[in-house]
Amino acid sequence: MSNLVEGATGSWEVVIGLEIHAQVSSQSKLFSGAATAFGAEPNSQVSLVDAGMPGMLPVINEMAIEQAVRSGLGLNAKINNYSVFDRKNYFYADLPQGYQISQYLQPIVGEGVVTVELEDGATAHIGIERLHLEQDAGKLIHDQHPRKSHVDLNRSGIALMEIVSKPDMRSAAEAGAYVRKVRAILRYLGTCDGNMEQGSMRADVNVSVRRPGEDLGTRAEIKNVNSIRFMQQAIHYETTRQIDVIEGGGTVDQETRQFDAPTGTTRPMRTKEEAHDYRYFPDPDLLPLEFSDDFVAQIRATLPELPDAKKRRYMDELGLSAHDAAVLVSDRDIALFYEAVSEGRDAKIVANWVQGDLFGQLAKAELDIADSPVSANQLGGLIDLISDQTISGKIAKDVLEIMFESGQDAAAIVAEKGLKQVTDSGAIEGEVDKVIAANPDKVAEFQSGKDKILGWFVGQIMQATKGKANPKMVNQLLRDKLKG
Ligand code: ADP
Ligand code: MG
């Protein structure tokens, strides 16, 4: 177990459980028809229900139910055909209703499991405790006026899925891998866009420490962390803080804390509230949610191939390594791009091009694959030019760079810049003869057994042909002629 952390008095184990809030991809809110578009004018997407007007009745959005079931299936979880919406009562200025409609004892989705891959190729199985549906609250804005706060209710009533993990993670790396995997699954399913910068996915991070083998320690809960990097910083900070507290003879308080990005630290917000503080009770405005096995089966029938199944297929059918397969399925857009290029082409060669040169160019330009200036079709065209020996793999790398900048097809660039590979053996032979004639000393070296000098000869000919000579033919001709 390399996950242990050394304190002053021995080793500690970190225990992490996450509550991920994922915004349901849906045009309208959980209990009203108001729109959910990101970035709209404040308070322009608020119905009377979302504003908490007295006497308004919530009406369940069936799309949101389907999305929750879809997500549950994707998380290998038990779907509960009977679930209940409860009121979670609390006061806050961003919550006009005075309660949040959520699910408490009977959530729509029960236990499941998510498999994550770690850097070293190991896998870990992280348990899902439950997934429930709830409404989001509004947003307070404090920086618009010296003495007043503003409230934007556009988020009020938006459908969220809260995905609660078991306390199964043992390091910041595992927690990061878990969030990435959950996000990938939801994106494959189309149930949440996973955009953490826009707040459509965020997590409450529960952290405790214990001596290996002991019972769970007291947890601190860090609220609303909206990036994987922040989450990992918060876990590192909490780990050290809690170990210091305990080793200093104190006890960790069960409390809610806030992450401070500029300093990478956490600070207390409030002591942890208990469920009874919220006086949960079934919302009298909403009937329990009931659906048939048939409804679930219909949704199951529309699920796409998910990352784990895809990875297995890439390995079994396409012969990719576990590592390559894992990288290519890690994101739905990448997988779709890869599949479009590899259709009818050598799967491994395409995998190398996508992960190597294309990813390199995308990273340099800070672009996602969805915004790649080189389309799947165009990358396929480039790879075809290598397979039919029009250009060498080396020239192809330069061509890709030009494609990236100009958006042109590979064939057009090759024609325009005269990059076509020289496969005319007469032409190559001429160059080979010239180099051999001009360098008798090097020829002698080769003949005395120094094969390494062959590379030098190849280099000379490539230089003379501006990299366009077919490398295989150059090698072959050189070997034949140098044997003397
Ligand atoms: P609450 O809403 O009170 O935070 P939940 O049950 O919704 O309660 O979530 C609790 C989260 O805390 C879960 O993700 C769970 O795995 C995690 N957790 C529970 N106990 C511990 C612990 N001792 N250390 C770390 N995480 C824990
Ligand atoms: Mg919590």
Image: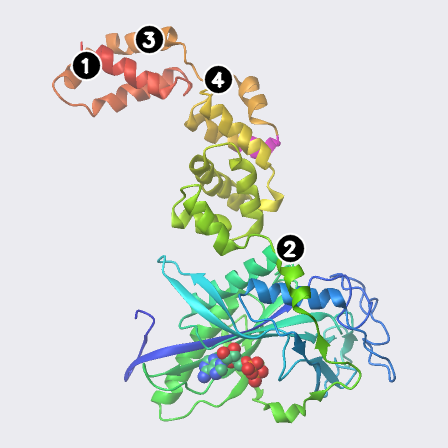
Q: Earlier in the sequence, mark 2 or mark 4?
A: 2
Q: Is residue 259 above or below residue 311?
A: below
Residue 228 visible in the displayed image? yes
| Element on which disc 4 rests | loop
Rendering coords of residue 388 (x, y %): 46, 21
Mark 2 and mark 1 in contact? Answer it, CB < 8 Å.
no
Q: State the CA–CA distance, disc 2 to disc 4.
A: 47 Å
Rendering coords of residue 283 (x, y %): 75, 85
Residue 23 visible in the displayed image? no
- The residue singled out by tag 4 in the image is 420
Rendering coords of residue 72 (x, y %): 59, 67
On the rendered structure, is 401 left or right of 83? left
Foreground label between 2 and 3: 2
Q: State the CA–CA distance, disc 4 to disc 1.
A: 29 Å
On the rendered structure, is 286 left or right of 121? right
- The residue singled out by tag 1 in the image is 443
Q: State the CA–CA distance, disc 1 to disc 3.
A: 16 Å
Q: Residues within 10 Å of mark 1 (few under 14, many from 20)?
A: many
Q: Residues within 10 Å of mark 4 (few under 14, many from 20)?
A: many
On the image, which quarter does residue 10 sit in? Answer: bottom left
Give the main secondary structure of the magenta stretch: helix
Residue kind at label 1, given as amino acid type: Val
Residue kind at label 2, given as amino acid type: Thr
Mark 1 and mark 3 in contact? Answer it, CB < 8 Å.
no
Residue shown at the point (26%, 15%) measured from the top left: 478
In front of the other: 412 or 248:
412
Residue 429 bears which disc, if any?
3
- The residue singled out by tag 2 in the image is 302
Mark 2 and mark 3 in contact? Answer it, CB < 8 Å.
no
| Element on which disc 3 rests | helix
